[in-house]
Image (cartoon, grey):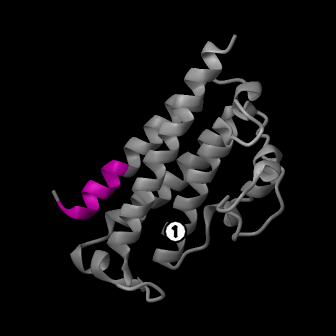
Amino acid sequence: MEAAEVLSDAVSRIRDLAVHTVGDLPAEALVWRPDPGANSIGWLVWHLTRIQDDHVADMAGLDQVWESDGWAERFGLPAGATDTGYGHGPAEVAALRPDDAGALVEYHDAVAARTAKVLAGYGPADLDRVIDEAWDPPVTAGVRLVSVVGDGLQHVGQAAYLRGLWERRG
């Protein structure tokens, strides 16, 4: 199995976990937070999807799905490709209020499909290509994709944990 295939498989697993975590939740559950300073299930899945969209689009020289497909409007957020949720505080987390899980799933599906398409054409030389020289050592496409996978797994796990708390709340 080639490295790009391994990364593609990891991205598809994040997609499956995200859909399983939010797929049948009501809007109330998507915005529930166990503490006013905590992230919500919906915000976590939105954020991990925004990071993947941002990083893969940048790496592949493409527009973000968020921008090209008008997702900001569907989430009631201002347009702009720079807001990925990084650095959000409690007010920004609370502002993300999807009407239902469908929007989260559809956006994630669109990003996962784009990522799979990009990775289907990638070989070892593509993964070794330096895409960000601001770091020491410089970041390659492969390293950036591993970062996307790590971030996605971390946040989908947090969302699943919150779902468990929401389901058991008293």
Mark 1 is surrounded, within 10 Å at the Cα level, by few (under 14), some (14 to 19) or many (20 or more) other residues, namely many
Q: Is residue 30 visible?
A: yes
Image quadrant holding the C terminus, namely: top right
Give the amino acid at mark 1. His
Measuring from the top left, give residue 5's x and y in whole percent.
26, 57
* Picture layout, residue 26 above or below residue 49: above
Quadrant (top left/top right/bottom left/bottom right) for the N terminus: bottom left
* Residue under the point 74% across and 43% down: 37
Q: Which residue is drawn at the image coordinates 75% and 48% (left, top)?
A: 93
Answer above or below: position of 30 versus 24.
below
Left or right? Give the position of 7 relative to 72. left
Residue at image mark 1: 55
Q: Residue furthest bottom?
A: 133
| Number of marks | 1
Q: Is residue 60 left or right of residue 7?
A: right
What secondary structure is found at the residue carrying circle 1? Answer: helix
Q: Position of residue 26 (x, y in %)?
A: 72, 24
**For the point 64% across and 21% down, which residue is it?**
166
In the current view of this chain or complex, which residue is farthest to the top?
Answer: 170
Q: Is residue 150 magenta?
A: no
- Magenta span: chief secondary structure: helix
Residue at screen point 41% across, 63% down: 147
Q: Is residue 135 left or right of residue 108?
A: left
Q: Quadrant of residue 29?
A: top right
Whether residue 23 is visible, yes or no, is no
User: Looking at the picture, how far across and down is residue 105, in whole percent?
Assistant: 60, 40
From the viewer's side, name the closer residue of 57 and 141. Answer: 141
Residue extent of the magenta highlight: 2-10
- The location of residue 4, given as percent across then percent down, is 28, 63
Would you say residue 7 sits in the magenta stretch?
yes
To which quarter of the image does residue 142 belong? Answer: bottom left
